[in-house]
Image (tube, rainbow, N blue to C red):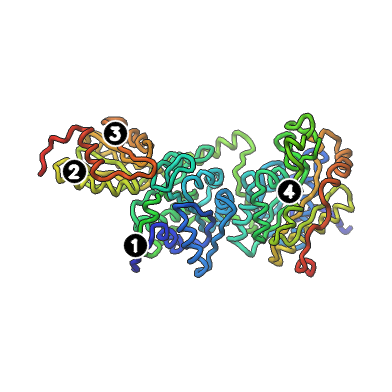
């Protein structure tokens, strides 16, 4: 297998190509732009199409149309751009369209700045647009995961017929790291009986989301609810790091999860039994990961690049059985492993523990 | 006895549900006949908008998708880019394509997207109960211009075909009406041309069809046809606004 050095955003582009995606509709926005640039250079070589749309709304609705034909399709943007896409994501969720949407999260609100952030967590995990729906959200923390999760995103989108969001940030997007270009995994056979591609030798099909009566509306909502429940039961993903004997846990995803691993190792050197749970799926949130630790762990710190959004899901996951505190940086700033450890020590009064 | 008139194969068996005197049904029938005559029903995917035109997804016999308000062309472009050998058309009201979705109309034309867009212009938002549209005429009373449209406040009627005709990627642009048998025949010719353009892969084809809305105009079905002639035709440039040399030789 080929090992190459690529920028994080380029990794996503390469993974899309190797996932069999041949359609990309997008609009340039920092810090996501290398994705559309990479595909603009590479797609023509494999017969793919990149269309730079008139705006983000156009791009997501082009994805909507393309996805109706059963074609693999992707768009990528950054926070303000993803806000604009929400109408189209809601419609895509309602019709049950597989597509991959990349959010290279930058800090906000408003225009904000270009630095890394996780402040779109609520938007990503609560649907984001109008109506009651969810999208699967995958959160990579390094280049190899940008590659692997992009491939996974396409498969999950096809498997469950819904948009899948890849939640990354400017730090991951701009960092160059080695990545192994694995072959595409064998994709499971998926139902194609809903695809709209011309009614040749079959009855016409309509893909739309208008419900003529409230009764139909409720039946639709119940159907989607069952689908989301099934996904919650079957698709939770997470990584554990030094959790087995942990007395305290960090919970963090993406870039900050990576920093937290150093914090855990440093804590262990000082005799503090610290572990890390790194959610890979932000939705469905990995509640199951916390089950073994609910009655065991003395305290949890949610480490985030926001005012504290994921912390609500952590508290729900542990049913508030232990203190759950927040350590956060905002506005594009990243924490150091040391300041996280200092916070853990101060919060749980651990500074007396001897160095080992 | 030979059957000389019947339901077009381009239509489904769902009966039209439009208000009396509305010309949506006439326009849809023309499109259906064109799909049948060009033998492209099975190759065609329609895109319906939001508004009265949104019901189109039920009335045609070809595949359809329903788009968000104003986004029919963007969605249609997504289909066409995925399946370039299929025929894709959008069927949109003026409130859809000339208000909330104007950017897609302009850029679909600028990029020469190989789709066909039909705009049904009745100068008003019909489905929501008769509000002012960007196509509403000066002085026209609607529920959001109850004293008559004041252009100093709300602006002038937008003549979308004229705008579109200025863009290089648009190869066929026509503005027609279905207020009389003669004009219905001309409208059909224009619609047919707009689909032939796509079949030949020449570029963006756009047909605007003036239509009536007796319910929201507050006139009878019969009066509405004369109202259209008296009030809309002088404002909106009619006829073939753009026919490139390539299209002429079709």
Query: What residue is pinned by disc 1?
Result: A179
Marks 4, 2: nearer the viewer: 2
* SS category of the residue bearing label 3: strand
Q: Which residue is mark 4?
A: B13
Numbered disc in front, either 4 or 3: 3
Identify the subunit bearing mark 3: A
Could you tell me if the residues under marks 4 and 1 are in contact, i.e. CB atoms within 8 Å? no
Helix, strand or loop status at disc 1:
strand
Q: Earlier in the sequence, mark 2 or mark 3?
A: 2
* Whole-number angstrom distance, CA of label 1 to CA of label 2: 29 Å
| 2 and 3 marks on the same chain | yes
Looking at the figure, which quarter contains the N terminus of chain A?
Answer: bottom left
Residue B228, position as x, y percentages in the image: 85, 43
A244, above or below B118, in the image: above
Q: Position of residue A195 (x, y in %)?
A: 57, 55
User: Residue A144 bears which disc, if any?
Assistant: none
Mark 2 highlights which residue?
A267
Q: Quadrant of residue A185?
A: bottom left
Quick check: A87 above or below A143?
above
Q: Is residue B142 left or right of residue A65?
A: right
Which residue lies at the image location 71% right of the left edge and 60% below the top edge?
B170
Q: Residue A16 at what x, y percent from top left?
A: 45, 60
Residue matched to label 3: A325
Spatial CA span between label 2 and label 3: 17 Å
> Same chain for marks 1 and 2?
yes
Question: What is the CA distance from the residue labelled 4 to the residue labelled 1?
Answer: 56 Å
Residue A228: in sight, yes or no?
A: no
Where is residue A307? Give x, y as percent.
38, 36
Query: Is disc 2 surrounded by few (<14), some (14 to 19) or many (20+) residues within 10 Å?
Result: many
- The crowding category of the residue bearing disc 4, from other C-alpha atoms within 10 Å (few below 14, some 14 to 19, many at least 20), is few
Residue at image location 78% in from the left, 43% down from the top: B122
């Amino acid at each position: 297998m080929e090992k190459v050095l690529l920028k994080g955003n380029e990794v996503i582009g390469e993974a899309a190509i190797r996932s069999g995606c041949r359609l990309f509709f997008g609009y340039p926005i920092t810090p996501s732009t290398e994705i559309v640039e990479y595909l603009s250079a590479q797609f023509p070589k494999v017969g793919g199409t990149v269309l730079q749309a008139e705006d983000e709304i156009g791009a997501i609705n082009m994805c909507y149309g393309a996805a109706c034909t059963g074609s693999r399709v992707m768009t990528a943007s950054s926070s303000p751009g993803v806000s604009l896409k929400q109408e189209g994501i809601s419609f895509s969720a309602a019709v049950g369209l597989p597509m991959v949407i990349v959010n290279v999260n930058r800090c906000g609100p408003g225009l904000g700045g270009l630095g890394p952030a996780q402040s779109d967590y609520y938007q990503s995990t609560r649907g984001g647009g109008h109506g009651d729906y969810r999208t699967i959200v995958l959160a990579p923390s390094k280049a190899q995961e940008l590659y692997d999760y992009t491939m996974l995103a396409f498969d999950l989108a096809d498997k469950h017929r819904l948009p899948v969001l890849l939640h990354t940030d400017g730090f991951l997007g701009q960092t160059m790291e080695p990545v192994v270009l694995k072959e595409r995994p064998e994709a499971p056979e998926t139902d194609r009986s809903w695809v709209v591609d011309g009614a040749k030798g079959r009855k016409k099909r309509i893909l739309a989301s208008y419900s003529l009566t409230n009764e139909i509306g409720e039946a639709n909502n119940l159907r989607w609810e069952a689908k989301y429940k099934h996904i919650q039961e079957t698709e939770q993903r997470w990584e554990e790091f030094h959790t087995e004997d942990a007395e305290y846990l960090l919970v963090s995803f993406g870039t900050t999860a990576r920093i937290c691993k150093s914090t855990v190792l440093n804590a262990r050197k000082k005799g503090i039994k610290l572990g890390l749970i790194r959610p890979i799926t932000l939705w469905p949130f990995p509640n199951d990961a916390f089950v073994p630790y609910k009655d065991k762990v003395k305290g949890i710190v949610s480490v985030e690049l926001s005012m504290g959004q994921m912390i609500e899901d952590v508290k729900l996951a542990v049913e508030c059985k232990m203190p759950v505190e927040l350590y956060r940086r905002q506005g594009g700033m990243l924490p150091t492993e040391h300041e996280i450890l200092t916070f853990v020590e101060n919060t749980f009064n651990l500074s007396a523990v001897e160095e080992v | 006895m030979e059957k000389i008139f019947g339901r077009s194969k381009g239509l489904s068996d769902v009966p039209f549900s439009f208000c009396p005197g509305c010309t949506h049904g006439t326009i849809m029938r023309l499109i259906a006949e064109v799909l049948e005559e060009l033998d492209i029903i099975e190759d065609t995917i329609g895109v319906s908008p939001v508004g009265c035109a949104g019901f189109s997804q039920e009335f045609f016999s070809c595949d359809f998708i329903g788009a968000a308000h104003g986004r029919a062309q963007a969605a249609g472009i997504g289909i066409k880019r995925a399946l370039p050998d299929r025929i894709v058309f959008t069927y949109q009201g003026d409130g859809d394509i000339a208000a909330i979705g104007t950017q897609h109309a302009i850029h679909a034309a600028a990029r020469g997207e190989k789709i066909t867009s039909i705009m049904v212009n009745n100068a008003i938002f019909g489905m929501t109960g008769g509000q002012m549209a960007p196509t509403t005429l000066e002085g026209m009373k609607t529920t959001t211009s109850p004293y008559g449209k004041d252009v100093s406040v709300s602006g002038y009627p937008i003549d979308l075909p004229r705008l579109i005709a200025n863009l290089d990627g648009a190869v066929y642009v026509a503005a027609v009406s279905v207020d009389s048998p003669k004009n219905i025949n001309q409208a059909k010719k224009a619609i047919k041309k707009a689909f032939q353009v796509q079949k030949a892969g020449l570029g963006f084809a756009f047909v605007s069809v003036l239509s009536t809305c007796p319910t929201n105009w507050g006139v009878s079905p019969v009066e509405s046809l004369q109202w259209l002639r008296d009030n809309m035709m002088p404002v909106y440039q009619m006829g073939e606004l753009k026919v490139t040399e390539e299209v002429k030789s079709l």
